[in-house]
Amino acid sequence: MAKRVFSGVQPSGSLTIGNYFGALRNFVRLQDEAECFFCVVNLHALTVPQDPQELYQRTLDVARLFVACGIDPNKATIFVQSHVPAHSEMSWLLECTTYVGELRRMTQYKDKAAKREVVTSGLFTYPVLMAADILLYQTDEVPVGEDQKQHLELARDIAIRVNNRFDEQIFKVPEPYIPPKAAGGRIMNLQNPLEKMSKSAENPKGIITLLDPPDVIRQKIRSAVTDSGREIYYDEENKPAISNLMVIYSLCSGKSLDEIRDEYAGVGYGQFKKDLAELVVETLRPIQARFEELSRPGVIEEVLAQGKKKAEPIAQETLKRFQRKLGLLPLCDS
């Protein structure tokens, strides 16, 4: 059987070109290599306050972008986390086998908690919900970036602990899927090239979202910070700003960083930024056109309904097996 892959995307902000090149484009490739489950993890978004209407709309928009970016619902299972109650149920069961010390060591929790006046218990325990997401589907591989490796390690530790307790494989122990490294690394913020481009960034000028209109994209790239000098070459340490723009150019065009350097030798930043803006606009044009098609009433809702039908039986089978092992009384149908 083909390996099984699970990955989730939070609807906590507008997806960026960083999300596209770092995750969604890899999802498109993986759907032809594995049995894929791609989930809009809206329960994770609740770890911090959300506007209900915005969360509702962003959940639909992330699902639309999955498809608009090339994920085929006939090849991969696309669904919403809250549509499958087994995620919440499994999370509680796994919390009861997870140690507080393990959660306190999560660096993302410490980083996020330090920025908030009020910290919810959900923010503290959400790595367990992430483990539930993964383990429910007997996942073989999980695409992860650097910031999620620690959470996957926790999921692995929990799976091994449960399997050892019952002396049998209740859960598959998932392995990380490390996608091929993009030229020069990940995409950084346009206003602060030392910070990753994040969909939850406070300054919208620093990110390019997949749904930004062409003129907005042009303005954001035009106002992107640059380094001293006029030379265009890749040097992540000494020229982080222009290096970041070169990475975006490379990912959109398929050209190597050396080819871009040679092409723009002696040209200067102004023309390079202008060309880059048009390249990004053209890269996103088909995605945005497909998104509009998917915005017709009922289209993406039907995709998500079919995804739920495929995901729920698998999740329920794993959940019920674990419940039986724990000694929970099954429901007797009358």
Image (cartoon, rainbow, N blue to C red):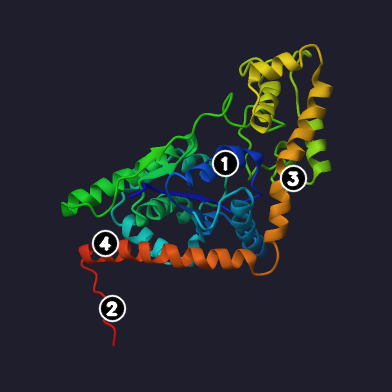
Element type at mark 1: helix
Element type at mark 4: helix
Instruction: Give the CA separation, mark 1 to mark 2.
Output: 42 Å
Q: Which residue in the structure is indicated by mark 1? A: 25
Number of the front mark, 1 or 4: 1
- In the picture, measured across the screen, residue 256 lies left or right of residue 100, that is right
Look at the numbered discs 1 and 4 and tell me whether their residues touch, using CB distance below 8 Å: no
Q: Residues within 10 Å of mark 1 (few under 14, many from 20)?
A: some
Residue type highlighted by circle 2: Leu
Q: What's the residue at 61%, 16% (across, down)? A: 237
Number of the front mark, 1 or 2: 1
Q: Which residue in the structure is indicated by mark 3? A: 285
Q: Which residue in the structure is indicated by mark 4? A: 322
Instruction: Give the CA separation, mark 2 to mark 4.
Output: 14 Å
Number of the front mark, 3 or 2: 3
Instruction: Give the CA separation, mark 4 to mark 3.
Output: 46 Å
Q: Which residue in the structure is indicated by mark 2? A: 331
Q: Nearer the viewer, residue 21 or 119?
A: 21
Number of the front mark, 4 or 3: 3
